[in-house]
């Protein structure tokens, strides 16, 4: 004959009415006590989490330090104010036309004229440059102030 396992024996004892009368009540009472305890633990855990979140938010938004207003120091002006007053009429220089009897022209100085100093170099125009180059050459503009002279069909020295 096969011997029943512990689980089977426990199951049979739970379903059997042959056990003591207070066993069933104590088993039910213990189950209810454990269920209430689990419920209480869940409620306490939820409350602790909410309290922790509230504490974290409070610490997050709490001012780090007290901000003191800066001490007012006299500002250094970046300018200097200058006050002006009009000049008296005696200090203003004016001109008056000469009378014709006072003006006289005398050749007292030699007039010297000068020309711009140059290095002796003269810039060639495009047409002058092309007239000096061989017939198989072209002038290519690269920009408003730059050009390139291209010499085509150049023969090597000594080869005809």
Image (cartoon, rainbow, N blue to C red):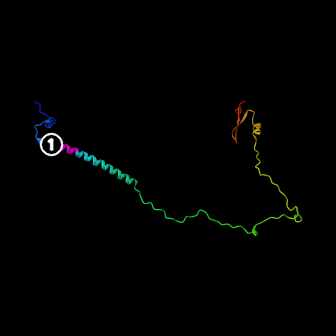
Q: Magenta residues, as a range?
A: 24-35
Q: In the rendered image, which quarter is residue 77 located in? A: bottom right
Could you tell me which quadrant the N terminus lies in? top left
Q: Is residue 27 magenta?
A: yes
Dot 1: few (<14), some (14–19), or many (≥20) neighbours within 10 Å? Answer: few
SS for dot 1 = helix
Image-based side of 60 in relation to 93, left or right:
left
Give the residue pinned by disc 1. Answer: 25
Q: Position of residue 34 (x, y in %)?
A: 21, 44
Residue at 29% in and 48% down: 45
Quadrant containing the C terminus in the rendered view? top right
Is residue 112 positioned above or below 155 on the image?
below
Horizontal and vertical percent position of residue 157: 71, 34
State whether residue 76 is above or below residue 4.
below
* Front residue (pair 128, 36): 36
> Measuring 30% from the left and 47% from the top, which residue is drawn there?
46
Seen from the viewer's position, the closer of residues 111 and 59 is 59
- Residue located 25% across and 45% down the image: 39
């Amino acid at each position: 004959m096969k011997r029943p396992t512990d689980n089977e024996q426990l199951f049979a004892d739970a379903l059997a009415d042959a056990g003591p009368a207070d066993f069933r009540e104590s088993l039910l009472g213990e189950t209810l006590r454990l269920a209430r305890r689990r419920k209480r633990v869940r409620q306490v855990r939820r409350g602790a989490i909410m309290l922790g979140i509230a504490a974290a938010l409070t610490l997050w938004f709490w001012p780090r330090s007290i901000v003191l207003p800066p001490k007012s120091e006299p500002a250094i002006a970046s300018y200097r104010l200058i006050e002006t007053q009009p000049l008296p009429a005696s200090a203003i220089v004016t001109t008056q036309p000469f009378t014709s009897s006072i003006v006289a022209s005398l050749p007292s100085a030699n007039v010297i004229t000068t020309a711009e100093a140059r290095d002796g170099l003269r810039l060639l125009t495009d047409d002058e440059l092309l007239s000096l180059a061989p017939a198989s050459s072209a002038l290519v503009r690269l920009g408003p102030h730059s050009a390139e002279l291209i010499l085509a069909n150049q023969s090597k020295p000594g080869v005809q």
